[in-house]
Image: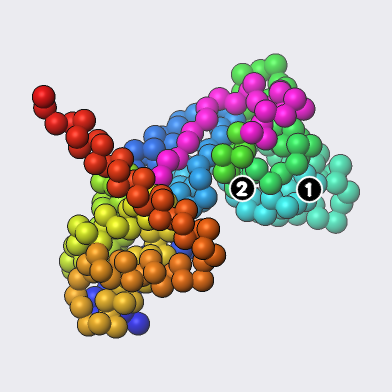
């Protein structure tokens, strides 16, 4: 609706994970580097909406041609269901056989690739929803109990910070102690929010990436807490409101209207929390500026 008005090739603030729009903040860049270089199980965590799935999709795009990858989105599956999904995803048709035969087929596939010097990567998103038994079995599937230094399966477990808590389960000690690296994605700071908005507008083909003035960017940064998914929802609504008013730029007033529209149905306690969050963020910014002043 507003795309032609702002001369955009596509909507810049969609909520569907898209690696083309991935903004590489410092924590995202560090996490992607580790995911690409690390050998052994890796855990990736971050608050909901901070870009974990888009980062994992970007990782899949950067894997070399000798690496086979399976990306498990549905973590309501049992371990047997996950194995069945992996077999189908990797083109190993064993669906008519028993769970034991399917598991044997997958282990054979992994061993053959290992002997050929080829890597296989299994990425499990929203892994905090897996039960302890499934997590433990995934660890064994990654050949963690091998006496050799090789790894048949590069395992990446991604999820909310709850995943770190889940891995403290005593039944997962073997998996926990074998984790090669833990990466954490953080919400964006105020400067990164501005760069994030510019980046997404640029990818969408905006001739002017300064569609949001500094007041609007600051308002979105404070209210969203730096969570990209929330920024996207608010920024999209801002562009819609600006289009309705036939305004070429989004100012703080438009940002305030977008926030008011999208929180209209919130219960009073949630609005109070949001207000306090915004106030606390503002006070923190003031305190930082005061502390940064020379004596």
Q: x, y percentage for residue 8?
A: 27, 73
Whether 54 is drawn above or below 29: the answer is: below
Specify the color scheme.
rainbow
Whether 75 is drawn above or below 268: the answer is: above
Furthest residue toward left: 295
Instruction: Report whether residue 93 is seen.
Output: yes
Query: Please, what secondary structure does the residue beneath circle 2 have?
Result: loop
Furthest residue toward top: 147
Furthest residue toward right: 98
Residue 177 on the magenta segment: yes
Q: Residues within 10 Å of mark 2 (few under 14, many from 20)?
A: many
The foreground one among 162 and 83 is: 162
The foreground one among 116 and 207 is: 207
Mark 1 lies on residue: 78
Q: x, y percentage for residue 127?
A: 64, 44
- Seen at 51% across and 45% down, the residue is 47
Lateral position of residue 238 relative to residue 43, left or right: left
The span picked out in magenta is 165-187
Q: Are marks 2 and 1 in contact (CB under 8 Å)?
A: no
- Seen at 85% across and 56% down, the residue is 96
Sequence-wise, which precedes: disc 2 or disc 1? 1
Q: x, y percentage for residue 248?
A: 19, 75
Q: Quadrant of residue 254?
A: bottom left
Location of the C terminus (image quadrant): top left
Lateral position of residue 91 relative to residue 25, left or right: right
Lateral position of residue 58 relative to residue 45, left or right: left
Residue 60 on the magenta segment: no
Question: CA–CA distance between discs 2 and 1?
Answer: 14 Å
Q: Quadrant of residue 18?
A: bottom left
Mark 2 lies on residue: 126
């Amino acid at each position: 609706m507003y795309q032609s008005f702002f001369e955009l090739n596509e909507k810049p603030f969609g909520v569907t994970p898209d690696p083309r729009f991935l903004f590489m903040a410092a924590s995202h860049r560090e996490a992607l580097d580790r995911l690409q270089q690390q050998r052994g199980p890796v855990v990736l965590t971050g608050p909901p909406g901070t870009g974990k799935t888009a980062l994992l999709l970007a990782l899949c795009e950067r894997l070399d041609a000798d690496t086979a990858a399976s990306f498990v989105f549905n973590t309501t599956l049992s371990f047997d269901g996950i194995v069945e999904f992996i077999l189908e995803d990797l083109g190993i048709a064993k669906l008519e056989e028993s769970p034991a035969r399917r598991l044997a087929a997958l282990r054979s596939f992994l061993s053959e690739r290992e002997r050929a010097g080829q890597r296989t990567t299994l990425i499990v998103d929203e892994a905090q929803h897996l039960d302890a038994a499934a997590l433990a079995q995934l660890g064994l599937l990654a050949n963690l109990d091998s006496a050799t230094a090789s790894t048949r399966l590069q395992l990446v477990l991604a999820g909310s910070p709850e995943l770190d808590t889940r891995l403290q389960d005593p039944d997962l000690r073997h998996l926990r102690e074998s984790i090669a690296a833990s990466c954490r994605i953080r919400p964006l700071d105020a400067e990164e929010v501005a760069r994030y908005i510019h980046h997404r507008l640029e990818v969408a083909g905006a001739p002017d990436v300064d569609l949001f003035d500094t007041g609007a960017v600051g308002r979105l940064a404070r209210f969203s807490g730096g969570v990209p998914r929330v920024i996207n929802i608010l920024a999209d609504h801002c562009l819609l409101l600006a289009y309705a008013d036939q305004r070429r730029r989004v100012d703080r007033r438009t940002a305030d209207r977008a926030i008011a529209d999208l929180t209209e149905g919130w219960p009073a306690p949630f609005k109070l929390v949001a207000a306090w969050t915004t106030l606390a963020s503002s006070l923190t910014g003031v305190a930082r500026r005061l502390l940064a002043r020379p004596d």
